[in-house]
Amino acid sequence: MDEHKYRHEFKYPISDLEAAVLSERLKAIIPIDKHVGETGRYTITSLYFDDKWDSCFYENENGSDPREKFRIRIYNHSAERISLECKRKERGKTLKTACLISEEQTKALMSGNVLNISEKENPLLMKFADLILRKGYEPKVIVEYERIPFVYQNGNVRITLDSRLTSSYYTDRFLENDYLKRPVMPVGTQLLEVKYDEFLPDFIYRIMQLGDLTQTAFSKYYLCRKYNTF
């Protein structure tokens, strides 16, 4: 599940109208990710962790380099496939490492009861269990949104349109999907994300010209922690 290399990653807030225009342009030349199913989109729910000093939050706010954050992620509110992920930002690029974990392991990480995690487990899982023990990492916020993903194999390009971004502090209900959620982004706003390895093909760059796109450096985790009032 690891991406194995650092990638370029850029984020831009755009309007619903701009998202609709861009989506139609992309559909004409780039396939949608095969995992979306008939709806053409999927729901991503992530449980983000931070230490007792909220280091990940403040490192994002201050633009620290390098920096890391950890999350557990599920799709379409299903616990059939659960992944533990670490995103590392360094010198303007992003590296994501991930491993599949069981529901039992998920609950252990959520509760901090990680002493029984075997040394034979995935190195990422062992690293995170160690951080929980040494630095007090614990669940901080649930981040959820709907995603329309486009994938172009040359250059490993991935363009996503994320909408309906919500947050919740009911972290103990992460696997249940029966908790209150607060909208985070302004009505009519979506988030465009562009990720690629070495280059972005010129024809994709031209398609994405929507006017004055303004790049944002803040992560969804940061935004949901900052503006969540529950």
Image: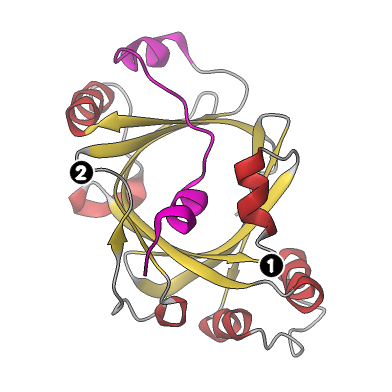
At 32% from the left and 14% from the top, the residue drawn is 207
> Relative to the observer, which residue lies in front, 224 or 117?
224
> Magenta segment range?
201-230
Does residue 185 appear in this view? yes
Is residue 210 found left or right of 17 in the rendered image?
right
x, y percent for residue 53:
70, 65
Q: Is residue 95 magenta?
A: no
Quadrant placement of the C terminus: bottom left
Which residue carries the number 2 mark? Answer: 187
Q: SS for tag 1?
A: loop
The part of the image, by quadrant, that contains residue 196 is top right
41 w.r.t. 74: above or below: above
Q: Are there few (<14), some (14-19), or many (20+) residues within 10 Å of tag 2? A: few
Whole-number angstrom distance, CA of label 1 to CA of label 2? 32 Å
Q: Amino acid at mark 1?
A: Asp
Instruction: Specify the label residue 51 is tagged with.
Output: 1
Is residue 120 found left or right of 185 in the rendered image?
right
The part of the image, by quadrant, that contains residue 19 is top left
At 51% from the left and 24% from the top, the residue drawn is 154
Q: SS for tag 2?
A: loop
